[in-house]
Structures are given as structure tokens and as C-alpha cells.
Amino acid sequence: MLCPLNWGLGHATRCIPIVNKLLSDGHIVFIASSGAALTLLKKEFPDLNYFSITDYQIKYSRKLLILNLFIQIPKLLRSIKNEHVEIEKIVTQNNIDLIISDNRYGAWSRKIKSIFITHQLNIQTPIFSFFVKKTNELFLARFDKICVPDFEGDINLSGKLSHCKFKHPNIQFIGSLSRFKKNVVESTKTIDLLFIISGPEPHRSIFENLILVETEKHKNLITIIVRGIPDEPDLPEVNDNCKIFNHLATGELQKLILSAKKVISRSGYTSIMDYAELRVFPFVIPTPSQTEQEYLAKYLSDIGFAYSMKQADFSIDKILNLQATNSTINFNSSYNLSDLLL
């Protein structure tokens, strides 16, 4: 059973190759999740078995994001406890023999092997960092194995988020985990700007509104916006040279990314793994006050993998003045899902 976190769409999309691997190996796949993550996977794999479980329902504020998140810790702990009860019930009633949890802390069982996928062994917080690290270690001690979707050596995607001292007897780096397939044919660049929006509200909508305002200033550019909300039926109005989608299937999105002169998105880790797989040089704009994304944006800019820009400084004019190129970084290998399942 696969259990991706519903926190943006990245946890769900990076589980797509895991589902494909399980199915190709002849396994019966159950998926337990919530919200948009569950909706996305149902669209990708309509014939699987699904369970709706407790959503963490963390609310982001426009300001004082970190303090706001710490205030919600009691609610988060209750959600994790309820989630664990639900998971144990599903395991018992459906004879589940393996759990793979992508950042769902309650998705484990005493009865069967439980694997946890995360790139954040060293969670970045401006305050209470020691408390957060120790709490993370206590939660992950319940899992039999931790799989880190990154490369173990000096050339890696996550920097100090994953490459740190962490107390657990079984940690394994499995390589970059992407739903996309390596591009073997050079694509014609017919799209000037591709915006891929993701992440929790209200910051997803704030970023979208900034983009919509900017695209009205550049009606001559061929622009595509992917909103990252698969359960939304309506679309905002845009100019004739701009196309907008609420969500795209994996193959369609890969074609757009490879056809775009410039790809602009948040610096979420799953997006970064996708760009690494396709050897695309992205323009990343971290969610304000989201420390993981802010760290990744700076780290990836420093190693020459991406351009980084603060949301407060964002404009299409500034994007146009920066030259996109293919990433020149050579990573050790692609992901190894056989290692994950051992």
C-alpha cells in the first residue's frame, strides 16, 4: 500500500513511478491518501484500490508562516494518530503486506514492513531546530527503512536536507525519483514561457495571480500555465497567446516542459527531481517563508542547476533577461526502485 502526503502535489507525483514498478512486478496496489493527492493518482491510475484517510489540514498563512505552523503542531499530532489507526484497520481488512509512506508519519504498521520516503532528514526551521530534528527521529524510528530519493555522493539534489547525521539503522539513498522519462530526442522550443504552479494555499493562488498579471503585460509571448489543482473544474480567462490548464497527465506535462524555452515553478523537491531527469534548467521561485524551498532554491543556484528568484522580485521581464540552458550536472544514476522494495 502506497501512502503519499497531501501537501502540494509533489508527494503524489513522485509516487507514480513507484506504482508503475509495483504493477509491472505483478503486485496488487492499494493507495491511501487524501485531497488533491488522491484525486491526482485516481486520474493517473483509475483502476487501482483507493482509501481516503485523514488529511493533515495544515493551513498556511500569508505572513509568519513558521510561527503559524508551530501553533498547529497539536492538530498535526492528532491527525497523525488518527491516520495510524486508519492505516492499521486498512492493513488488517485487506491483507496488506507492505506499506510505503511518502512523508505520512502515521502510515506504518506493527504487523508488516513499513518504508518511509523523504528527502528531509534535516528539516530546515529558523527556530526550534533541535526539537524538530529529535521529533523527526522519533517518528521515523517506527519505520523499518528510510528511503531518500537522492544521490549519496557530493553531487546531489538535496544538499544538507538529506546529507546529514541522522539516527536510524536503515537509511538508503535510492537516486532521483521522477515520474518522467529521460528525453532522447531534442524537442522544438515552441513555448516561450511555461509556468508550473503548485503547493498549498493561499500561496499557490498568490503566485498564480502574480503570473496572470504579468502575462497580460506580455501578450505577444506564447505562454502556458499549469495551475496544479486537479480537482478544480473552472479556468480563469487569459489572452489569446496564453493557455491555462488545471492539471495535466504525466506524458502531456513532459512534452510541454521539453517544448518550453523557459520553465518557471516553485522550488519543490519533486519538481527539482523532474528537471534533473529531463536535464532542464529551471527558474525557481520558492514559496515565501517556506524554509525547505528557500534553501533548495539557493543551493541549486549555487551549484549551477537553476536560477533562483524571490517572489517579491518576480517579473517576466527579469525572466526574459536570464538565459536558460540545459543542466551540465552529471548525476550518478537514475532511481533504483528495486532497492526501495528490498
Image (spheres, grey):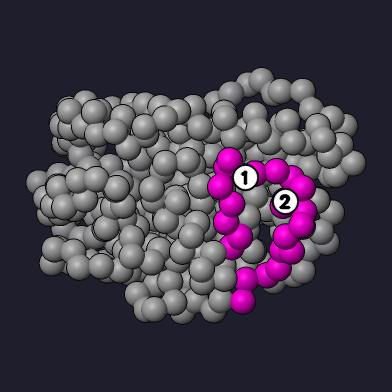
Q: Secondary structure at mark 1?
A: helix
Q: From this viewpoint, which residue is outermost toward the front?
A: 313
Q: Give the spatial CA distance, label 1 vs label 2.
A: 8 Å
Q: From this viewpoint, which residue is outermost toward the top?
A: 234
The amino acid type found where label 1 is placed reads: Asp
Any part of residue 15 in sight: no
Depth check: 77 or 164 in front? 164
Q: Locate residue 335 relative to residue 240 in the image: left or right.
A: left
Q: Is residue 324 magenta?
A: yes
Q: Locate residue 80 relative to residue 32 in the image: left or right.
A: left
Give the residue displayed 86% in from the left and 37% down from the top. 219
- Examine the image and state in which quarter residue 25 appears: bottom left
- Examine the image and state in which quarter residue 12 appears: top left
On the image, numbered disc 1 is attached to which residue?
313
Q: Which residues are magenta?
A: 306-328
Q: Position of residue 34 (x, y in %)?
A: 37, 30
Q: Position of residue 48 (x, y in %)?
A: 43, 39
Q: Is residue 14 magenta?
A: no
Cβ–Cβ below 8 Å for labels 1 and 2? yes
Q: Locate residue 290 relative to residue 206 in the image: left or right.
A: left
Say above or below: 168 vs 124.
Answer: below
Q: Secondary structure at mark 2?
A: helix
Residue 318: mark:
2
The amino acid type found where label 2 is placed reads: Lys
Give the residue displayed 16% in from the left and 58% down from the top. 144
Residue 220: mark:
none
- Examine the image and state in which quarter residue 330 appears: bottom right
Q: Mark 2 packing: few (<14 Cα in 10 Å), some, or many (20+)?
A: few
Say above or below: 40 vs 320.
Answer: above
Give the residue displayed 77% in from the left and 23% down from the top. 237
Give the residue displayed 32% in from the left and 37% down from the top. 66
Say above or below: 341 vs 124.
Answer: below
